Amino acid sequence: METVLWIVQSLLAGIFLATGLIKLTQPRLKMAAGPMGWAADVSDGQFRTIGLLEVVGAIGLILPGALGIAPGLVPLAAVGLA
């Protein structure tokens, strides 16, 4: 069961990391014209903040459990991403 949990955590972390990095590196208006139509309704700062929070959440899903340091942060990161 623990293996399944790690696989799901890794997949979710990868997805959130990728989407967060896209939000941090791509222009908001370019994303608004394409797959992220909602980006037209937020400011650049809000768009970048969402991206940063997704990257931090992805790190929070993996590192505490993998390093064994404060593993209680993993569920908090999951709730934060939800």
Image: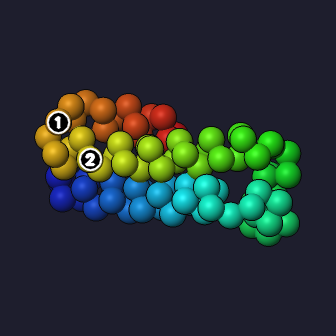
* Residue identified by numbered label 1: 69
Crowd around label 1: few <14 · some 14–19 · many ≥20 (10 Å): few
Q: Position of residue 82 (x, y in %)?
A: 52, 40
Q: Residue at x 80, y 42 (%)?
A: 43
Q: Tag 1, which secondary structure?
A: loop
Residue 63 disc label: 2
**Of marks 2 and 1, which one's residue comes earlier in the chain?**
2
Where residue 37 sits, quadrant-wise, is bottom right
Q: Amino acid at mark 2?
A: Leu
The vertical placement of 58 against 71, above or below, is below
- Tag 1: residue type? Ile
Is disc 2 in contact with disc 1, using a CB cutoff of under 8 Å? yes
Kind of element beneath mark 2: helix
Q: Most extreme residue toward the left, as rendered?
A: 68
Q: Nearer the viewer, residue 32 or 27?
A: 27
Q: Residues within 10 Å of mark 2 (few under 14, many from 20)?
A: some
